[in-house]
Amino acid sequence: MKVKITTAVLCLLSLSAYAGGEHLHHVEHFSRAPAGIMGDHVHAQGDWMFSYGYMRMHMDGMKDGDDDLSDAQVLNDFMVTPLRMEMEMHMFGAMYAVSDELTLMAMLPWVRKDMDHITRMGVRFTTRSEGVGDIKLGGVYALARDDSRQLMLNLAVSAPSGDIDADDDTPAMRDAQLPYPMQLGSGTWDLLPGMTWTGRAGHYSWGAQGLLTLRLGENDNDYTLGNRAEVSAWGGRRLSSSWSVSLRLRGQAWDEVDGDDPLLNPQMVPTANPELQGGRRIDMLAGAALALPAGFYGNSRLAVEAGAPIYENLDGPQMSADWTVNANLQLVF
């Protein structure tokens, strides 16, 4: 499967926006995107925004296509099967508005991953990795906007700061190289283009975002992670001057790994097989946001979001997603 973003999606976003040129003041907190969306707004010239984001994803069991697999089915073909996986990410971000149209951004992630396994002999064990992920630098540019709608260009670069040599002890050996999903970065420079459209009217807000992750070259371990496409559409409603709620649909598609890490045995565990890493998933997520009280400048807010897959098709055997939680604190100065 090759992930592609079509010009039709970008044209749809463009046609949905009003190409006004009036000055846009700070976007009210309730019209911002849900907690799991980044790069959804620009700021007034000279403004700073500092943010802290938290993401936790739980994966449970194995799937091939849209069929659930038992441990025994996976162990017929592999010596080890994953059971569960937890991934946590702490994202520290900063945004600065160079002008009313252009806001620059930087994001530093701290990632932790835990994966439980069982062998054919019934031995259970857990592997872990933790550290800095891939740093992202980029910006958001307002292409068209008025006081209620915006069309924005997203463009960022991901630097290969995350570890691709993470290891841990297993029953087979000490300090074993961990499989692809347990590494902390891609090992390549990645290009992250996209577009975001947002709007609001009365008590309601809405938006859509399309993003690509394009891997540039091959990493030092002789492989390239698959390209990724993500599209989200959401709607929100203001409940009061402080509270708002949202509902979001997110679709994701990602390719298998190109090449292979020579330190991994693809016949040992599915997560070490580069041809078993692609897939597609649609999630539904519900969220809420709270405008911070007086004393905070501008549109500072706290937002949370949680959801689960409603569709999943994996090039497996591969770990199946169970649920996701996102939280985001934004402070504007």
Image (cartoon, helix red, strand yellow):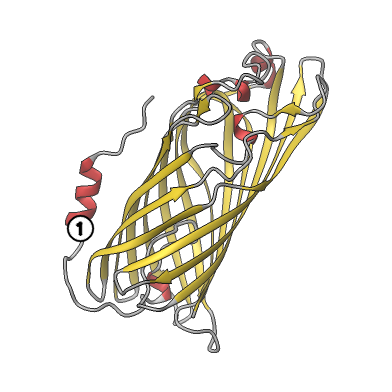
Tell me where residue 43 appears, x and y as whole percent. 37, 73
The front one of 110 and 53 is 110
Left or right: 236 in relation to 76: left
* Residue occupying image coordinates x 25% and y 76%: 147
List the single residue furthest toward the front: 220
* Residue occupying image coordinates x 41% and y 63%: 33
Circle 1 packing at 10 Å, graded few (<14), some (14-19), many (20+), is: some
Left or right: 249 in relation to 14: right
**SS for callout 1:** helix
List the single residue furthest toward the bottom: 294
The front one of 199 and 310 is 199
Tell me where residue 288 appears, x and y as whole percent. 50, 66
Tell me where residue 30 appears, x and y as whole percent. 41, 73
Tell me where residue 270 appears, x and y as whole percent. 62, 21
For badge 1, the amino acid type reads Ser
Dividing the picture into quadrants, the one containing residue 190 is top left
The front one of 133 and 232 is 133
Numbered label tally: 1
Left or right: 47 in relation to 132: left
The front one of 296 and 57 is 296
Above or below for 212 versus 39: above
**Which residue in the protein does label 1 denote?**
16
* Residue occupying image coordinates x 42% and y 78%: 47
